[in-house]
Amino acid sequence: MNSIKYKDFKTHEKAFFIGLIIWIFLQTTRFIAFSLIDEINNGGESLAWMYPAFLDIFAAVLAFPLIAALCINRGLSVWSMSIIYLSISIVDHFGNFTTTTFVGPPSIVEEGMDPLLVPIIQTVLDFIFLILLFIPTYRNLFFKLKTSND
């Protein structure tokens, strides 16, 4: 028995799967947190930003192995890793909201930009993909097996 192949996905399943991979790949932009950590270490930014910065780096670094796992071999562990990844990403965004509220936005936020807009959009998309992972149609992409006779 092998995992169901991508070519056997229905159109909406392909859209979900490609969307999830693209969304996780876009998390690599969180490597910008290295510059924030550098500013924190140089005293230019509040230490309160260290926690969100570390979670951003976590999300950026683990994006690549998760994408590889999604493409190579889906199953319980990859489904679980996807849920954990999106959950930690959401926790990071709430840390960002809290720090922005009490300390102010980090210096990496461009002048004139709403410091909460991007984290709100990211949180909404993380929630959408997290919820979709629990819907049987999309959850089964990780568990549905196809016999070699099919």
Image (spheres, rainbow, N blue to C red):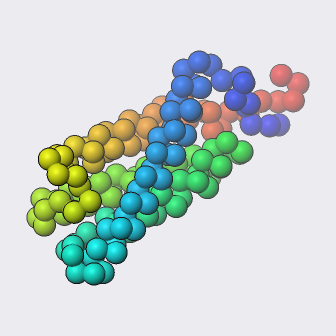
Q: Nearer the viewer, residue 8 or 52?
A: 52
Q: Quick one: which residue is furthest to the bottom in this view?
A: 42
Q: Nearer the viewer, residue 148 or 32?
A: 32
71 relative position to 127: left or right: right
Q: Point out residue 11 in the picture as x, y percentages from the top left corner.
A: 59, 18
Residue at 28% across, 74% down: 39
Q: Quick one: which residue is furthest to the right in this view?
A: 149
Residue 33 in view (yes/no): yes
Classify the position of the C terminus by image quarter: top right
116 relative position to 75: left or right: left
Residue 50 vs 125, above or below: the answer is below
Residue 100 vs 142, above or below: the answer is below
Residue at 26% across, 59% down: 108
Q: Point out residue 44 in the picture as x, y percentages from the top left corner.
A: 21, 75
Q: Nearer the viewer, residue 101 or 108?
A: 108
Residue 55 in view (yes/no): no
Residue 55 vs 142, above or below: the answer is below
Residue at 29% across, 40% down: 121
Q: Point out residue 86 in the picture as x, y percentages from the top left corner.
A: 43, 49
Classify the position of the N terminus by image quarter: top right
Q: Quadrant of residue 89?
A: bottom left
50 relative position to 145: left or right: left
Q: Quick one: which residue is furthest to the top in this view?
A: 11
Residue at 37% across, 64% down: 33
User: How many marks on residues?
Assistant: 0
Q: Quick one: which residue is furthest to the front in this view?
A: 111
